[in-house]
Image (cartoon, rainbow, N blue to C red):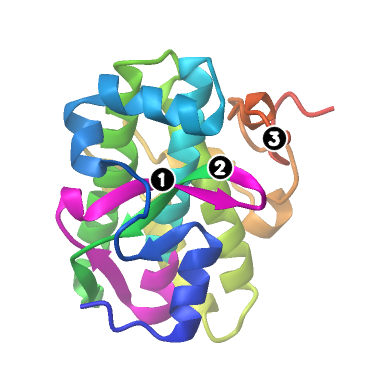
Amino acid sequence: MMNLTQEQKRQLNSYSIYIGEPAHPLFTLKTLRSDPESALPLVCAVSGADNPAVAASYFSRRVGMFTAMQLYTLIVYEEVWKGPDDALQFGAVEEYGKLSVSMFLTGGGYVMVDGAERQELIRNLLQSYTKEVSDALRMVSAAPSLTHWENMFGFLLYHLHVLLSDPWTAEEAEAIMEILKDDRTWEGLAKESLFAKYLRGSSPSLLLNTTVRTTCCHSKDVPGLMQCGYCPLKR
């Protein structure tokens, strides 16, 4: 059930995640996985990006916001959203004067997570919302999988910076970060922890607004958007 406080809803909305049906639906997560050839042209149309690789990266940045928020709610509230793939919908929404692809939770609900289940849960989140999305997008675009992983890491980096700086959440944030850095969490996803490689032994706070990425997210190539602060091509 969506028994969320107003503050929780505000946090979700600030990352383009809404509760309920979209007024202008595009497709669901289930559709993206099964028919990316139909989904990506809709992303191109909404974003204004003609290049499929640019549109794919734009889309995985949007999904990356959701994935990072799942880990945020795990740290702060000890709960995550669970629901079927067709309950995570994508819709066209005007945000800051520009049409954007936003996410809508149309079913499922937020459930409490047992501490002993965190590593398996995190692996499943990475599998469902980053690897499988990346695999689908790579069928119809040239954007490499690492681009999609780094798109999510950028949002996660900021969340961890905030949560590690807060004494109320620092301990749990540190525990979740260690799980993300653990190679065992990445079994079946990658040869080693891609997040540990992304951090390069540094803390999230020290990496803010640095060229921590090794791939370009192409934000600068989407009409109306700017180059991101982590870009390896930053000048």
Instruction: Residue under label 1, please give it.
Output: 63
Within 10 Å of disc 3 (Cα), the crowding (few <14, some 14-19, many 20+) is: few
**Residue most extreme to the front:** 23
The image quadrant where one finds the C terminus is: top right
Instruction: Residue under label 3, please give it.
Output: 224
Q: Earlier in the sequence, mark 1 or mark 2?
A: 1
| Closer to viewer: mark 1 or mark 2 | 2
Element on which disc 3 rests: loop
Disc 3 vs disc 1: Cβ atoms closer than 8 Å?
no
Q: Residues in magenta?
A: 72-98
Q: Position of residue 59 (x, y in %)?
A: 45, 35
Q: Amino acid at mark 3?
A: Gly
Find residue 215 and report its image quarter. Answer: top right
> Which residue is more in the foreground, 160 or 50?
50
| Closer to viewer: mark 3 or mark 2 | 2
The image quadrant where one finds the N terminus is: bottom left
- Residue 135 relative to residue 46: left or right: left
Q: Amino acid at mark 1?
A: Val
- Residue 90 relative to residue 30: left or right: right
* Residue 73 on the magenta segment: yes
> Which residue is more in the foreground, 123 or 128?
128
Q: Residue at x 62, y 69 (%)?
A: 162
| Closer to viewer: mark 3 or mark 1 | 3
Instruction: Residue under label 2, please give it.
Output: 99
As measured in the structure, the alpha-carbon distance from the residue carrying label 3 to the one carrying label 1 is 19 Å
Q: Residue at x 59, y 47 (%)?
A: 201
Find residue 80 and report its image quarter. Answer: bottom left
